[in-house]
Amino acid sequence: MNPLAPLREQIDQVDQQLIKLLSQRLALVAEVGKVKSEHGIPVYAPDRETVMIAARREEAEKQGIPADLIEDVLRRVMRESYANENKHGFKRVNSNIQKIVIVGGKGKLGGLFGNYLTLSGYNVEALGRDDWGNANHILANADVVIVCVPIANTLETIERLKPYLTENMILADLTSVKHQPLQKMLEVHNGAVVGLHPMFGPDIASQAKQVIACCNGRYPERYEWLIEQMKIWGAKIEQIEAAEHDHAMTYIQALRHFSTFVFGLHLSRQPIQLSQLLALSSPIYRLELAMIGRLFAQDGSLYADIIADKPENIDIIESLKESFEQGLDFFKRNDKAAFIQAFEEVHHWFGDYSEQFLKESRILLQQAHDSRR
């Protein structure tokens, strides 16, 4: 008889109890979701989450359980809970809105927002690329028109909407660049205008804790309800000027995507098998490979548009090349002292964020290692 069999059987029984407890918790979350939906309470309550996590950590330590373990478990359970709350819909903030049209609403991101608006009780219609022959009917009596098309098509799409817009409509866009689209919307429309940039993709399970950049255009009091609606979904709204947003995106998107693209391009041309790299990889390298592979699993035209959006992007990428050359030169000259000095300069620039990122990355690496087979 296997000496571990009795203990493993007991562990299996405890695991079954855990499953039942998780089922009970999710059932309670479903009830919470109904109450939130009815009363318009945001999905994500940061204060409640902070207090609850702190309390459970303290209770865990008293019972000899690592506090980090219970926090890991609870955060995973809460992520599932946020996704489940979507099923019950959301309170409709503005009952006067009769019709919302999403131009590009048949795409992935447009479809995501269409689904959230529908779950909030709004009548949503999609205007796809093949629907312009019927645009007059689709856009008639719309209260809100949201543009969600590729960057390269955004300005011409906004211009194309001009004959169908009435002053009482709210015109918005979900493009990842903001200055030019916002100016174009202000040019073609005399009514309320707002530029939005969801800082996430269409594959999210919940908008809880997700960031949406908001660039005010005209008559913000008219679309204030829309911002509140997104907050109820759990999103965090970051107000920012359009030009400032685009400058930040040079680093957050263009530079990052280009670096990832070049790393993948270079790797693909080396005499090495990806399977071997994975077999020998440390958790951090495996995570880096996952981020690179994730990029190439998506639409290349989207990233081409983001990188080529404005001259500033190319200028910053040129400066990245200079930094690569400078870094390589340290080792060509075998000047480790210069490397260490530069290293310390960067460490000083990160300041207290270094320790914060070290902690955050440690959690990510542990999760990446856990999923390894």
Image (cartoon, rainbow, N blue to C red):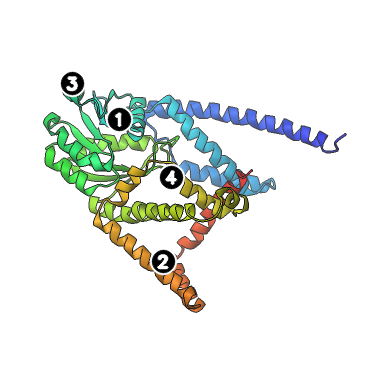
Lower sequence index among marks 2 and 1: 1
Do tag 3 and tag 2 residues touch (Cβ < 8 Å)?
no
Q: Quadrant of the C terminus?
A: top right
Q: Which mark is residue 324?
A: 2
Helix, strand or loop at disc 1? loop
Residue lying at 44% horizontally and 70% vertically, measured from the top left: 327
Q: Is residue 37 visible?
A: yes
The amino acid marked with disc number 2 is Phe
Q: Where is residue 359 drawn, in percent x and y?
A: 54, 56
Q: Is residue 163 above or below residue 62?
A: above
Please name the amino acid that badge 1 sits on.
Answer: Gly
Percent position (x, y) of residue 16? 68, 29
| Callout 3 secondary element | helix
Q: Earlier in the sequence, mark 3 or mark 2?
A: 3
Circle 1 residue: 105
* Callouts 2 and 1 close, C-beta under 8 Å: no
Q: Provide the residue designation for mark 3.
A: 137
Q: Quadrant of the N terminus?
A: top right
Q: Residues within 10 Å of mark 1 (few under 14, many from 20)?
A: many
Q: Which mark is residue 296?
A: 4
- For discs 2 and 1, the disc positioned in front in the rendered view: 2
Q: Quadrant of residue 225?
A: top left
How far apart are the two marked residues, 4 and 3, measured between alpha carbons? 39 Å
Sequence-wise, which precedes: disc 2 or disc 4? 4
307 vs 331, left or right, is: left
Q: What's the residue type where badge 4 is placed? A: Phe
Separation of residues labelled 1 and 3 (CA atoms): 16 Å
Task: Compare marks 4 and 1 and give the one earlier in the sequence.
Answer: 1
